[in-house]
Image (cartoon, rainbow, N blue to C red):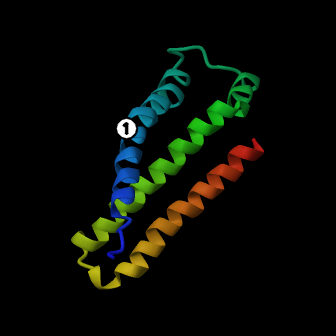
Amino acid sequence: MSRRSPEPLVWLLFSGGGMVAALLVPVLLVLFGLAFPLGWLPAPDHEHLLALVRHPVTKLVLFGLCAMALFHWAHRFRYTLYDGLKLKQASTLIIVVCYGTAVVGSVVAGVVLLRA
């Protein structure tokens, strides 16, 4: 009986994270980086944004965005180290550091969102 590789799950997290980041991050950057500061749209007040962030669905979306983007980064960085820098001999260390960082970052994002 052969052991199954976790590689399909890792590629799923990579592609999902890339899609989520490509769809949501530009919208947030345009809104909070350009539209509100330049006065193109009226800026929401602090209480409204705080109420929005405290909503469970918003917390879930923000957590998903953070976690998926971190796993996208981890997979891309892993293969950059493998192929770009030719460090395949340290594959176990690279896997642990890259995906471990993504897991720790996801936990931190979850804790921050739960306390908001």
Q: Which quarter of the figure has residue 64?
A: top right
Determine the residue positioned at 52% across, 68% down.
Answer: 100
As drawn, 22 above or below 69: above
Residue 58 point in image, percent of width and height:
63, 32
**Residue type, numbered disc 1:** Ala
Q: Is residue 103 left or right of residue 92?
A: right
Task: Tell me how many marks there are.
Answer: 1
Determine the residue positioned at 45% across, 33% down.
Answer: 24
Outermost bottom residue: 89
Q: Which quarter of the figure has residue 44?
A: top right
Determine the residue positioned at 23% across, 78% down.
Answer: 86
As drawn, 47 above or below 85: above
Residue 56 point in image, percent of width and height:
69, 33
- Give the SS element for disc 1: helix
Position of the N terminus, as image quadrant, is bottom left
Q: Is residue 50 left or right of residue 58?
A: right
Position of the C terminus, as image quadrant, is top right
Residue 15 point in image, percent of width and height:
34, 48
As drawn, 92 above or below 115: below
Outermost front residue: 1
The residue that disc 1 covers is: 22
Residue 49 point in image, percent of width and height:
69, 27
Relative depth, front residue between 3 and 95: 3
Determine the residue positioned at 44% across, 56% down.
Answer: 71
As drawn, 79 above or below 58: below
